[in-house]
Amino acid sequence: MRINDNFEKLPESYLFSTVASKLREYRESHPGVDVIRMDIGDVTLPIPQASIKAMHRAVDDMAEKTSFHGYGPEQGYDFLRNAIAVNAYAQRGIEITTDEIFISDGAKSDLGNLGDIYAEGSVVAVANPGYPVYVDSNVIDGRGGTLVDGKWSNFVYLECNEENGFKPVPPAEHADVIFLCSPANPTGVTFTKAELKAWVNYALANNAVIIYDSAYCAYITDPELPHSIYEVEGARECAIEVRSFSKTAGFTGLRCGYTVVPASVCGFDEAGNKVSLRKLWLRRQTTKFNGASYVIQRGAEALYTSDGKIQVRENVGYYLENARLIRETMSKAGFTVFGGDNSPYIWVKSPDGESSWDLFDKLLHEVNISCTPGVGFGSAGEGYIRLTGFNSKSNTEEAMRRIIGFFADKA
Ligand code: MLT
């Protein structure tokens, strides 16, 4: 069998696997050293009680002939799809119907799998820096071209930097598929409605589709900022929205997310006929996916009960408080920082022009904190690191004490 050669073009390992293996090596060679993890965005609080209780009941359902569930609908159970349509959309004045919502085992899978429904030759636009799944999955699908100086020749890079506040703006050139993330991973910055409107206009003018990664929307506290791209007029014609229960409700280990494909979003076939993407995504999911587990979907549904909503708000508030502490401490220590107010991520500029990996090594070896090197999110991330607010409050406080101590000593 001939392999998919695109794998050989990719860097040896996925960003977070590389960070984890460096951390493992350090811990093995420094037993007893307490490293505080502020790298991958993995949660530390347990699952909200409302959800736990619902999952216990769902497990009991599985024990009885009358309530047992075998294969579920590939696109998800209506009880969860309806709860999302009402709570995540209708209550915010957005019209999304149940059959436009597809439940999955998480946003990461959907973001990678969506590549099945657009042509191999599609021009893909990605923010630089951006979540590496957008780039790596499109390279695997054959859309990358060749890697030159950290950039794939066939992608349109949406350069983000201090000057534009790390917010990508529509490019001069054409793209077919655009990945946007807000609040952004890794920079923590959030689009305003006007900024999103510029993207919707670009997509409509280019017959392009926006894949809008909204995994962190629960962290938006500013009432002026949009939670969903569908708050922008025209987005129902050009945008797919991907969301997750991971960062909202601690489902990183349970796995559940969803993708919204409005019936009005279309692509074109070879003959130029309009084709509904919702239809293609349904075909893709029914063919390659057997649905998220019944028990987990019951757990997700319970997040929309009144208790569930309160508990989700508490968890999100806890991480936002950590993010605030990190942002303020890093600023006080003299770092330039972005994000961390409507986002769990804080994007930190290396103080002396050090490379991302050099700062990663310094923090790991001398301060015993692990971070994510910014360059792992794209060439424009060089010279930055990303910290997360997902650790416990006490670990976050300890990490900040270490940072202040170390950098004050150096000053
Ligand atoms: C991150 O740290 O960027 C995320 O946790 C990774 C993910 O959600 O897959």
Image (cartoon, rainbow, N blue to C red):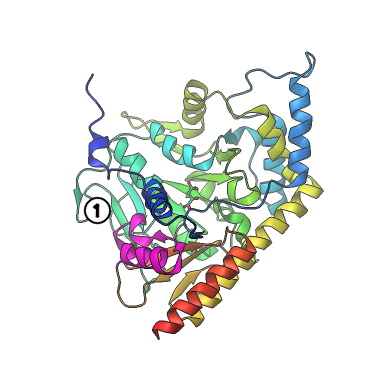
Is 261 situated left or right of 112 in this image? right
Give residue 119's quadrant in the image: top left
Q: Secondary structure at mark 1?
A: strand
Is 229 situated left or right of 112 in this image? right
The image position of residue 270, as x and y in percent, is: 31, 29
Q: Main secondary structure of the magenta part?
A: helix
Q: Amino acid at mark 1?
A: Lys
Q: Residue furthest front?
A: 31
Q: Residue at x 22, y 32 (%)?
A: 5
374 or 30, which is in the foreground? 30
The image position of residue 396, as x and y in percent, is: 58, 66
User: In which quadrant is the N terminus drawn?
Assistant: top left
- Please tell me whether residue 294 is drawn above or below residue 400 in the rendered image: above
The image position of residue 310, as x and y in percent, is: 77, 54
Per the image, the residue denoted by label 1 is 151
Q: Residue at x 47, y 81 (%)?
A: 333
User: In which quadrant is the C terminus drawn?
Assistant: bottom left
Magenta part of the protein: which range?
355-380
Within-10-Å neighbours for mark 1: few <14, some 14–19, many 20+: some
Residue 406 visible in the current orientation: yes
Give residue 268's quadrant in the image: top left
Is 342 situated left or right of 314 in this image? left
The image position of residue 255, as x and y in percent, is: 58, 38
Is 165 situated left or right of 306 in this image? left
Residue 377 among magenta residues: yes
372 or 368, which is in the foreground? 368
